[in-house]
Amino acid sequence: FYIKMEGVCNACGYYSIETNYFYIKAGSLIALHEDGAYMNTPSSIARKRLLDSVCVVDGNFYKLKRDAKCKSATAAACYVLGKAVTYSKWRDLKGKYLKDFYPNNFIVGE
């Protein structure tokens, strides 16, 4: 699954049905800056821990050095974009959502 926004991020990830965790893949480029409304939220604080532990600055992005385990696909999307969003930002190359592949694990409108 991918989130691509020119100048903001270019990340890919995958969902593990066995563990119910979402992983952002190594090499993903994630937002360098956070949205003002997102700053200092619990998710933002968790994002900062992720950045400190598995990221390096690469030009105008953070780059993941290894796969990053996230509590949920929504958390992973927030970490990638640096703002409050839902799991629906993750899509495959054909534009399908996680709920299309895992209907029992993702709720419509979440």
Image: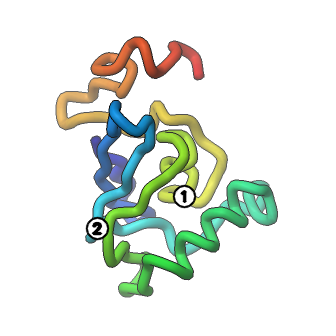
Could you tell me residue 47's position as x and y percent?
Answer: 61, 65
Could you tell me residue 60's position as x and y percent?
Answer: 43, 80
Q: In which quarter of the image is residue 62?
A: bottom left
* CA separation in Å, label 2 and label 1: 14 Å
Disc 2 to disc 1: CB gap under 8 Å: no
Mark 2 neighbour density, 10 Å: few (under 14) some (14–19) many (20 or more): some
Residue 53: which disc? none
Q: Which residue is drawn at 57% across and 16% down?
A: 109
Q: Residue furthest left?
A: 94
Q: Residue at x 51, y 79 (%)?
A: 53
Give the label, 2 or 1, closer to the camera.
2
16 or 60: nearer the viewer: 16
Describe the element under mark 1 as helix, strand or loop: helix
Q: Can you identify the residue that label 2 sits on?
A: 26
Q: Which residue is drawn at 34% across and 20% down?
A: 102
Q: Quadrant of the N terminus?
A: top left
Colour mapping used in the image: rainbow
Q: Residue at x 49, y 67 (%)?
A: 31
Q: In which quarter of the image is residue 28?
A: bottom left
Could you tell me residue 34's position as x and y percent?
Answer: 64, 66
Describe the element under mark 2 as helix, strand or loop: loop
Mark 1 neighbour density, 10 Å: few (under 14) some (14–19) many (20 or more): many
Amino acid carrying mark 2 in the image? Ala
Q: Can you identify the residue that label 1 sits on?
A: 79
Could you tell me residue 35's position as x and y percent?
Answer: 68, 60
